Image (cartoon, grey):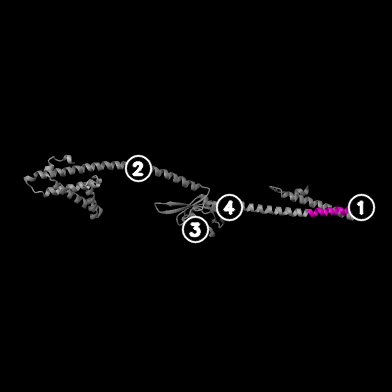
Amino acid sequence: MLDELDPKLSETISRDMLRDIFREIFAHLAIDLARAAEDLDTAGRELGNYCLKVFSGGTPFSFSINTQQRMLIAARMVLENRLWETPAGGDIRDLQHHLAQLRLAFSSATIRLGRRWEAQFRQLRQSDLARIQDLKTVKTDLQKQLDIFYQIIKESPIAMIGCDSDLNVQMWNAAAARFTGYQRQDIIRKPLLQIIGKNDKAQLTRHLQSGHPYPANFRTQIHSKDGASLPALTAISQISYAERHDIHYLISLVDLRHEETLRRQMMQIETLTAISRLASTILHDIRNPLNTIGLNAEVIEQYLQEAGSLPGKVQTLLERIHAQIRQLNDSLTQYLGYSRLSEMQPAPVNLALRLQD
């Protein structure tokens, strides 16, 4: 800016006058900044401290573009006032000329500053547009991932339920409808606790309010639409929305009815196995005295034959006793064989055909 001034400027305008001019410029600038900051004392003090550092060599002279433009506008105003207030006369024509020249230099600097500001604005705008495009790309990718995530939840074979912070149902997938019998329109925006068993409501609420990491799974009873109580393995996931300072929950329910059926069957098998072992022990206990009875009957028959006094009726009774003992032994052997079977596959039998044979 100074290279545009007349070299004789220093001869016409004294250092004191220049100091007074710049003092007025900074005073106007302080007032202008104070209007923007709504604090005259603070703005003036900060500007004064800054200028003190500049003129003492402690910091380079650098204002923001906005402050620079405000300073140039203040300089034009001060010089305009100086020109109007300077009395006319031949001795001060050179002073007026150089003041006008100084004003012209400040005006030129204002134009150059505006162009520089425009160039920086264009550069920043291009940079911002590039960033906006990058953010749009990231948003598109995130939206695709979110769509995939929701599709997985929607088609999941596991019952998935989305709830807000008050445990009102916001999402209900097809597996949840199949499991509970409630369709989406029956349950959306209604409390989830209405389908939780009475004894499990407190447990679920305690898990959510504890602030501790949620258990991977715990058992709950779910009330279906038809009034049945369904066992389920429950898992809770927390979803935080930072921009809304809100927390949502994603609750998974695994149907345990098949597992419960298997458990009952296993208990039944264990019970039958215990009964089988007990029956086997009882059959062994019966077989031993039965064998003793058979041996004693044979001894009695032998004694009577040796004595030559074996009546026919006694012989007939002894044969019947032997026949019954053999039949009981065969039955016991057959029953004991059942306890060693690892698998039974009963088949229907037509008794009428068997009787005809």
Disc 4/disc 1 C-alpha distance (Å): 72 Å
Residue designated by label 1? 306
Give amino acid for label 3. Answer: Arg
Instruction: Identify the secondary structure beneath mark 3.
Output: helix
Q: Which mark is residue 206?
A: 3
Residue designated by label 4? 257
Give amino acid for label 1. Answer: Glu
Q: Residues within 10 Å of mark 3 (few under 14, many from 20)?
A: few
In the image as oriented, which residue stretches furthest toward the left?
90
Residue designated by label 2? 131
Q: How many marks?
A: 4
| Foreground disc of the pair 4, 1 | 1
In the image, is residue 264 part of the stretch drawn in magenta?
Answer: no
In the image as oriented, which residue stretches furthest toward the right?
308
**Boundaries of the magenta span:** 288-306
Give the camera-side residue of 189 and 52. 52
Disc 3/disc 2 C-alpha distance (Å): 45 Å
Give amino acid for label 2. Answer: Arg
